[in-house]
Amino acid sequence: MKKVLFLALGCAFVGLSAQKKWTLQEAVAYAVQNNLQVISSQNNQRLQQNSLSIAKREYLPSVAGNINNNFSFGQGRDFFGNTQRNDNFTNSANIGADMLLFNNGRIEKNIRRTEFELEAAGYDVERIKNDISLQVAQQYLQIMLNKEVEKIAQSSLENATKLLDRARITTEVGTTARTVLAEAEAAVSRENQNLKNAEINTDRSLFALAQLLRLTDYKNFDVAEVDVEQKPEAPLYSAADIIETAFGNQPQIKAAESRIKAAKAQTEITETAFWPTVSASAGIGSSYFNSLVKRYDQFGNIVKDRTFFQQYQDTFGQQIGVSANIPIFNKGITRLQVEQSRINEQIAQNSLEIQRQEVLQNVQRSQFDAESSYESYLAALETEKSTALALDFTEKSYAAGRATIYDVNVARNNYANAQGSVAQAKYNYIFSLKLLNFYAGIPITL
């Protein structure tokens, strides 16, 4: 009994999970956390953070220890020219420290350059997140459009089925010819095909959004129904109103500005090569020697080496020093490197202008798209209204025997096409409007 209850609860949980419908906010939040491009840009940001930590640690002295052990074997000559065995063992140990005293601020300038590069990397992450958010929003609206077209196709199929039922009755009683029934059946077949195509388009758009979210179980993926405003208002902003705001809040422009600062800092770093570098060093060390051959003094007594710790105490020494490396001539390479850095500054400045021009074009294009889509939407509404009146008149005329079933089907197709055009224009306008508002600093929501 417990196993049955456990299985039932498990199935219920799976069913609830499968029925989850994603809102636009949920889809955007999930995409910016799991999209591969976002993850790649975040890894690059982490690399820049580590580079900044490394640059800051250059202020600290470097300390290293060294231990040497050496065995020597073979014949050797002493001071008097006598040949004898010279087998011995030596050991030495020392610890040294080096610290930079002066390099015309190279470390500080390198830290500043790395900070600007980290800042630019952060803006790159933000830009990619914005791009992914816009892609998700566009695909989300495409799903909603396809679902609305699917509803239109379903309604058309229902109306065609009602007309077929009526045609069967009138044909059976002999008031209409069999061609009327055949046309009604053909109309139902066409509407069935239209509905299947609409369902396929909906599934295709759901799959595309699931791919953006990196979801494997796309077959159980669906989005929440959103009550989109039936008659959207005209655009609130124009390109002239928001262009300065867009220049100030778009991350690609901020990233380009940070890279200009980084390029200038790199030029300052390169110029430090003209200046001398002053370093300080300090160290301590000691050593041990042990002869592996018996040695005798002038009286014939065996000479014994002092113990390891005695020798380390006897030979313990310290040293401290200051050194300066003064550049005199390096074939003019430093001057050429400075010129290269200044060229990179110009390249960074040009990249900023390119980004500003791209944002300007995107804002203007969004305004044109919003205005044209809105006009198309208003025109589609008028067409829908006219075709609805025409369909109503044709259906009444058909009921009165003054119109044929062909006329009804043509009027119904015209009305369905007009409904589809209204839906298409509405969602095109909504996305253009959301994009325009996005450049104005308004988050994308539905």
Image (cartoon, helix red, strand yellow):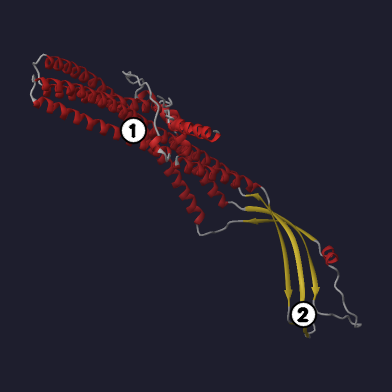
Q: Nearer the viewer, residue 241 or 236?
A: 236
Residue in the image at 36% along x and 33% along y:
139
- First in sequence, mark 2 or 1: give its number: 2
> The disc labelled 2 sits on which kind of residue?
Asn
User: Which residue lies under the disc numbered 1?
Assistant: 361
Residue in the image at 45% along x and 44% along y:
345
Q: Is residue 116 visible?
A: yes
* Spot occupied by residue 320 in the image (x, y as percentages of width and height): 74, 56
* Spot occupied by residue 289 in the image (x, y as percentages of width and height): 80, 71
Which residue extends farthest front? 1
Could you tell me which secondary element the residue under label 1 belongs to? Answer: helix
The image shows residue 254, relative to residue 163, as above or below, that is below
Which residue extends farthest right? 299
Residue 174 in the figure: left or right of residue 351: left
The image shows residue 367, relative to residue 394, as above or below, that is below
Quarter of the image for residue 152 reads: top left
User: Which residue lies under the disc numbered 2?
Assistant: 86
The image shows residue 132, relative to residue 289, as above or below, that is above
- Distance between the Cα atoms at labels 2 and 1? 84 Å
Q: Nearer the viewer, residue 100 or 46?
A: 46
